[in-house]
Amino acid sequence: MSTQKPPNSSTHSTSKPTQKTIAEITGLAVTTVSRALQGDEKIAQATRLRVSKVAEEIGYVPDRAAQRLRTGKTKVISLILDPHNEILGFGNSLITGVAHALAGTDYHLNVTPQFLGGDPIEPVEYIVRNKLADGIIFSRTRPFDERVRFLRERSFPFTTHGRTEFGYQHSFVDYDNEKFAYESVLRLMQKGRRRICVILPPNHFTFHQHLNYGYMRAIRQEGLQCYIPEGINLDSDMPEIFEWAQTIARTSDAPDGFICPGETSFLAIANGYRQAGKERGRDFDAVVKSSSQTLHQIDSQIDNISEDIRQAGALLGANLLKTMLHPDGPFEQTIQDPDITFPALKSYQD
Amino acid sequence: MSTQKPPNSSTHSTSKPTQKTIAEITGLAVTTVSRALQGDEKIAQATRLRVSKVAEEIGYVPDRAAQRLRTGKTKVISLILDPHNEILGFGNSLITGVAHALAGTDYHLNVTPQFLGGDPIEPVEYIVRNKLADGIIFSRTRPFDERVRFLRERSFPFTTHGRTEFGYQHSFVDYDNEKFAYESVLRLMQKGRRRICVILPPNHFTFHQHLNYGYMRAIRQEGLQCYIPEGINLDSDMPEIFEWAQTIARTSDAPDGFICPGETSFLAIANGYRQAGKERGRDFDAVVKSSSQTLHQIDSQIDNISEDIRQAGALLGANLLKTMLHPDGPFEQTIQDPDITFPALKSYQD
DNA sequence: CATAGTACTTATAACGTTACAAATATCGGA
DNA sequence: TCCGATATTTGTAACGTTATAAGTACTATG
């Protein structure tokens, strides 16, 4: 108290306030200010209070660059956004979800775009190399995903949207695609459909397997023929799918039921069938996985099983935060349950 | 040369290489290494070459935190993503565009989500306060946009997607909504429509004015009645628009032409009209502004005027880079021309 | 009253980089 | 041979923060 320096007003009025400014005002040492702001128990409660009050008053905000340089922690989480995820607001919902999970913490969200045609490992390597984040979230995992291997080798915290098939555990959030596919088959059968086709993602993705399992399980159980198109997948352009649908719609054994794990594939198929004079509800049916209300507006009677992307984002954020806190596990592994609420069945069960 | 220190191998083999590592290997001073890496002409070409070769070899990457602390430059550009921009991949396209503009520079892209219902100034204040970026991009500008005022006051570089009506100039990229609306009216007239309705964004946005001007100009010129719905706007939920459309479709003076500056509004309207037994092409027509191929798949005969969002992002990035280089202007102001290519008219011009 | 402990505060150094001023070497010309 | 000019390199300090170790003052204990 007695050693309080004269409040050198010229120093702390001009530019951005730092801990030094607070130190000068309170007459404390910069170290004390730093520790007070960190809530160190070894600093007297009264001091802590005083410091944070002054900090508040003069509008002090910590310099993240300095913190980062000193501690090595970026306090940033990087979400890698895949260009294929454009589908009806997927990216935005995911971002919003993660951002919500991070709100209240001092972590920032950084979105790294993954360029179309680029190697998926690139953004991950880049982030690790340049230490641009403390944790990474990415999607579209593969059974033996290179990114997972890479990050695990370096003990770099991450969470994935989608599972892998490695022998070791890691944090993830996934959607129960197996159940989605299985229930979809049952629903289509309920509507009298027998030639049920499923649109699968490219087979190097893990969720290809899950969808496939669910579909095949139901198909076998019900004694149906499986119908998996070749040359067409969930990532195909709409015009491509449209062309394909238009063609097969005119064949004698054209599918009368579709399982579409994405909205756009359904739209393209419905359009292709329409060109061939076939209407959804009369000539064929479909169960669609969607994450927005858009589809329902286009076809209000469509059977739709929803996936809550925003929730997935929030879970991913939360799981990653936990992983960073306890880097050696246990790993949070969350599987989202499909929300199945079909419209009531009409009487046209022929 | 003679003063070369012995290559203290223990120092630069373990952890991440820094300029110090390079200095030790080359026998130069850290300062020289720093300036060589910056390409300073005052450093001998031979030295520059040698330094960058060693840097490459040992996999040196500059520590951004240290650079940032020292220079005050974050080398980050922040894109503020509005939740309303979810519409069919808007966000992703914009991100991709900006990212492309930034590729090759040492700027990073950081996406800051704007929460639904939050004050638009919040993310901007936050970025400036915490100095999280050197430049900001945001959209959905208002005529007297608070964010523009705020950033200009602080001479903080920014570019907007959309114009303002301030007396001073600033960098922006905008779409020619006036032309879009005007041309849409003409197109609908060409198709024999006379009761032409326009869906406008909330009237606090600048592009509300532009759309309105274009629409009104054409309406007056052609001697038509204007039809601007109340209670419904471009940001309304699809179910809301659907309800509205369903109701007016049954009125005697129901519009037979719609100008939809967004895909979802069209879908909701088409659905509402369909409930009332009215079909697009027969009972009404629409011109839709879209930025994806999705709509075309749903209705291949639809008149659609496209907006290239990815290009907008690229322009925004480029403009902002220029603004940061020359903070006092001249400001890049780009207006994107609508891409108008309608399907050939059928003969049903009654 | 000395001593150990407790409660709290502080000086010093360092993270990796760059701005600045200063130093050294090299060279042509007087 | 000496001088100034040019070319090139270097030492020092600083950006704002925090970890570490060391300090001070006060209290309790024997």
Image: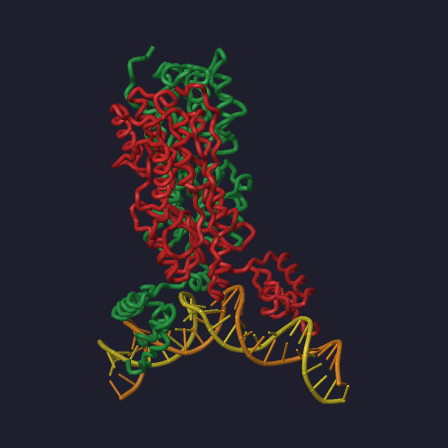
Chain colours: A red, B green, C yellow, D orange
Residue A126 spot, x, y in % from top left: 36, 57
Residue B293 spot, x, y in % from top left: 33, 32
Instruction: Work out which quarter of the rendered image holds the C terminus of chain A and state it.
Output: top left
Q: What residue is rendered at 59% in x and 64% in y?
A: A21
Q: What residue is rendered at 60% in x and 62% in y?
A: A37
| Front one among A255 and D26 | A255
| Front one among B310 and A94 | A94
Q: What residue is rendered at 29% in x and 16% in y?
A: B346
* A288 relative to C9 in the view: left or right: left
| Front one among A103 and B315 | A103
The image quadrant of residue A4 is: bottom right
Q: What residue is rendered at 59% in x and 63% in y?
A: A38
The image quadrant of residue A6 is: bottom right
| Front one among B279 and B314 | B279
Residue A213 spot, x, y in % from top left: 36, 41
Q: Is residue A307 above or below residue A273?
A: below
Residue D24 spot, x, y in % from top left: 67, 79
The image quadrant of residue B36 is: bottom left
Q: Is residue B17 above or below residue B114?
A: below
Q: Is residue A199 visible?
A: yes
Instruction: Work out which quarter of the rendered image holds the N terminus of chain A and state it.
Output: bottom right
Q: Is residue B307 visible?
A: no
* B165 relative to A269 in the view: left or right: right
Q: Is residue A134 above or below residue B18?
A: above
Q: How many marks?
A: 0
